[in-house]
Image (cartoon, rainbow, N blue to C red):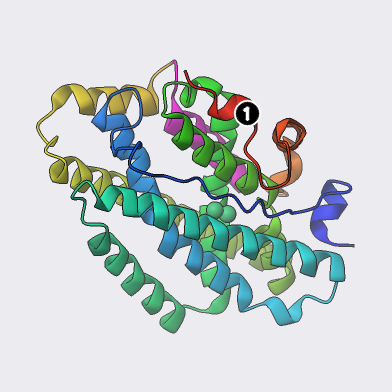
Amino acid sequence: MSATTDHVQDHKIIPRNIDFELDEDVTYDWHSDCPGISNMWNGLSLLFPEGELFFVKSAQNYLSIVKDPVFKKELKGFMTQEMIHTREHVVYNEMLKRHNIDTDRVNNILKWWAVTGHKYLPKSIQLAITVSLEHWTATLAQAVLDHPQILEDAHPKMRAVWNWHAIEETEHKAVCFDLLKEAVPNPVAFYLIANSTHIIAAPIFLLSAHAVYLGLMARTGNLTNGKAHWNMLKFNYGRKHGLLRRAIGHWFGFMKPGFHPWDHDNRHHIKAWDDAAAGLNEIPEHIVAAE
Ligand SMILES: [Fe+2]
Ligand SMILES: [Fe+2]
C-alpha cells in the first residue's frame, strides 16, 4: 500500500481534461477591475509551464524505484494532471501575449534554471524542490478553496481555471512528498533534505513571484499605479482575501517533524467539485455562473 493510501483511504488521482476556452472575452485585467490583483495571478501563471515541467521531470527520475502499482498509478495521475495544467497555462499565457506581455522572457529564464537544475543538482534535491513548491501550490489551493471570496470578483472563466487547478493540486498534494520518502528512506536524511530545501525555496519563490509581478505591472503600464499595488498588497495580506498570508500560515506546518500533506484532509472540496460537475471533464455550473 502506498504512503498516500496509508493516510487517506480510497484516494484516486483523476486528471480532468478541460479546455477553458480563454478567447478574446478575457483580458489580462480579469480580477476586481484591478491590474494589481490580476497581474499577481498572471505572474503565477507565467511561472507554471516551466515550473510544472520541472516537477514532472524531477518525479520521473524516480519512476523506476516505485514498485507498488497503486502508488505508480498515483504518480502517473500526478504527471498527467501537471501536463494538462501546463497546457492550459500556456493557453492562459497566450492570452497575456495578446495584451503585449512578453511571456517568452520569463519562460526562457525559467527554462535556463530548470535545465541547469536538472544538470547539476542531485536528483534528491530536484525532487525536494518539487516537494517544497508542491506544498506552496497546495497551501495556495487550500486558501482558494476554503475562502471562495478570493475568486468571487474574478472573470468566470478565470475563476474556473484557478478553482480547477486548486482542486487537482489538492488531489495530488502528497505524491511527490511520498516519492521523496521512498527515494530517501532514512527519516533523518529525509527530514534534513526536505526542510533545508524548503527553507531555501521559499524566499526564491516569493521573490520570483513578486519580480514577475513587477515586470507585468511595467509591461501593462501600471508600474506607477499606486492604487493597484495597494490593492494587490491588501489582497495578499489583508483580512478579507489574504491569499499569501493564509498560504504562508500553512507553510510552516511542513517543518513539523512527522508532517504529512494529508494530515489536513480537505478532500471534501474535490468531492464537491466532482459532485457538481456534469461529467469528469466538465466545469461545475456554479463556478462559471456570471457574477
Ligand atoms: Fe499544477
Ligand atoms: Fe502540483
Q: Amino acid at mark 1?
A: Glu
Q: Is residue 130 visible?
A: yes
Q: Is residue 244 left or right of residue 66?
A: left
Type of secondary structure dominating the magenta stretch: helix
Q: Residue at (73%, 36%) from the top-left corner? A: 278
Identify the magenta region: 240-255
User: Farthest front residue?
Assistant: 24
Q: Nearer the viewer, residue 253 or 291?
A: 291
State yes or no: residue 134 in magenta: no
* Percent x, y of residue 47: 38, 55
Q: Residue at (50%, 20%) from the top-left corner? A: 149
Q: Is residue 185 visible?
A: no
Q: Is residue 113 above or below residue 291?
A: below
Q: Residue at (53%, 65%) from the top-left corner? A: 55
Q: Where is mark 1, residue-wise? A: 285
Q: Nearer the viewer, residue 209 or 180?
A: 209
Q: Residue at (26%, 31%) from the top-left corner? A: 36
* Percent x, y of residue 169: 61, 48
State yes or no: residue 245 in magenta: yes
Residue 91 lies in what quarter of the image?
bottom left
Residue 130 lies in what quarter of the image?
bottom right
Residue 34 lies in what quarter of the image?
top left
* Percent x, y of residue 114: 40, 72
In the picture, the quarter occupied by the N terminus is bottom right
